[in-house]
Image: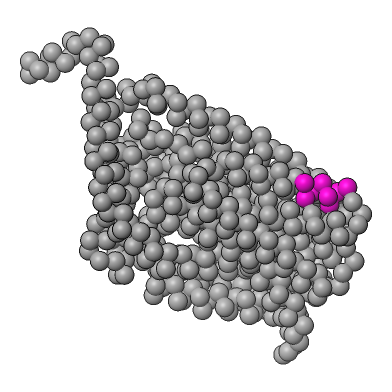
Amino acid sequence: MNPENEKDKHSPATDTGATATTKIDVAYKENLLDAEQCDENAEIDKRLNRKFDLHILPWLFGIWLFSFIDRSNIGNAKIAGLPEDLGIATTGTAFNLVLLVFYIPYILVDIPSNLILKRVRAGIFLPSLITAWGLVCTFMGFTKSYAGLIVCRLLLGMFEGGILGGVIIYLAMFYRRHQMLYRSGLFYCAAPLSGAFGGLLASALGQVTYGGYNRWPWIFFIEGAITVIFGIACFFFMPDTPALAKFLTDEEKIWALRRMRLDASGSTSIDVDEEKLDWRWAKMALKAPQTYFCAAIWFFLLVPLYSFSLFLPSIIRGMKYTSTTAQLFTVPPNMTGFLVVILTAHFSDKVKQRGVFIIGGTVLGICGYIMLLASDANAVKYAGTFLIAAGVFQGSPMLMGWLANNLSPHYVRAVGVGVVISLANCSAFIGTFIYIDRDSPKYVLGHSISLGALVMTLILTCAQIAYLRWENKKRERGERDDRLLQDDAHLLGDRHPLFRYTL
């Protein structure tokens, strides 16, 4: 036996502590040197971000815009005559079932889709999904029966299921942790914009009568066809990873990979291009408390978000407006949500805070639902929809950024994001059934459940902030340094003592 090893074996506990301290000091110095080099390369860092913003974000924005339009346009089709033409009862829950079935495959495919993303190449996989669901949406206009509509919604959910998690993981391949939220906001603001754009488009398409297809089919025909064209264009312009981005120089590719390692605070030495699927990463994601905090917060947040997106035309029509006017009146609240998402995302990255913005948004949303419940005046109710849009839409990009910030490396993030999205989207089983036609025009049940969900969102967000602050303080005091003594210390991911959680 090596005498040095024998000496180490019998060294006292204080030596163990000293070893951990030495390792953390070395890691700190290495990261300090990297940080100094990062300052020297500030210009190339800015150049990288500008190129990524120009070559990646527009495509992600379009993906999410058409995703939300194609899943939510059934709400516009509803008030353009779809239930009457297909013989769907307007007094029961038959239409709500059509909304619900979308989320069954949507939930089931998310984790497998995230794991497939890198193996199949993101620049091929994501555009394939877009093109596929665009075709489904287009052919939905030919539907002649209730059963056919159900099948189309199932297929739509299957192809859209991998998009949100895929986009989050795709962004994390290119941007550093505290550059992620603003970019998440820039693509997610397409969700409220889709409500505004979709409302305008539906108000026009809902008047078309041609070739035996009257009004609502044209909403699916035109919006689906636009999605297919966009999906095909994505094949030619979306890179798989920074190393394969044709618009980067060799120097920029090297720095793009290096800064991602630096951003992980020494938690891993593996590049995104080299990382392989290992069940240790899956277990790390499944054991992380922040995974379940984010899942629970998002679950309750999505109840009002989904119901608001799907039923806003019906809520406004319940204020005694005609079908076309109701479509047009969905535009201003959604535009408000669009602007608020961009502003909050910008300032969130500035201050490196996520939870406080979610808290602020839930308070706004709570006030909006109180206005809908407490007042009989249409002006007050309509004003409440603005507060709901401003408060609810900005919460999802905050949670996406929050989760991506606090899980590392790539496959931990991939599994964690998939778990969170799958669990959170179970809220669709609530959100799609709380607005029933028999409750119109006041929809007291739907508004009340949405209000309660936002209260739970507020409580759980405060709880996660408290947990993350507690864990960061333990690391600052050196109470997690013993992890550096493990043989796989270079694979600790977000459990590394130098890693700090974003609040």
Q: Nearer the viewer, residue 83 or 70?
A: 70
Of residues 99 and 70, the one nearer the viewer is 70
Is residue 220 positioned above or below 186 on the image? below
Q: Give the colour scheme shown.
A: one colour
In which quadrant of the rendered view does residue 264 lie? top left
**Is residue 169 at least partly visible in the picture?**
no
Looking at the image, can residue 45 be seen?
A: yes
- Report which quarter residue 254 is drawn in: bottom left
Residue 271 x %, y %: 28, 50
Instruction: Using the image, determine if residue 497 lies above or below residue 260.
Output: above
Q: How many marks?
A: 0
Which stretch appears magenta?
367-374
Q: Residue at x 27, y 39 (%)?
A: 31
- Characterize the magenta stretch by its predominant secondary structure: helix
Q: Nearer the viewer, residue 313 or 282?
A: 313
On the rendered structure, is 115 left or right of 218?
A: left
Residue 332 shown in magenta: no
Q: Residue at x 83, y 50 (%)?
A: 371
Q: Please check the rendered image and state whether residue 373 is part of the magenta-colored stretch, yes or no.
A: yes
Where is residue 90 shown, x and y percent of the image? 85, 64
Q: Position of residue 442 (x, y in %)?
A: 88, 54
Q: Position of residue 400 (x, y in %)?
A: 52, 49
Residue visible at 68% across and 54% down? 390
Left or right of 124? Residue 261 is left
Q: Quarter of the image containing the N terminus?
A: top left
Residue placed furthest toward the bottom: 211
Residue positioned most to the right: 376
Q: Nearer the viewer, residue 344 or 66?
A: 344
- Identify the residue at horizontal 82%, vertical 63% (top origin): 316
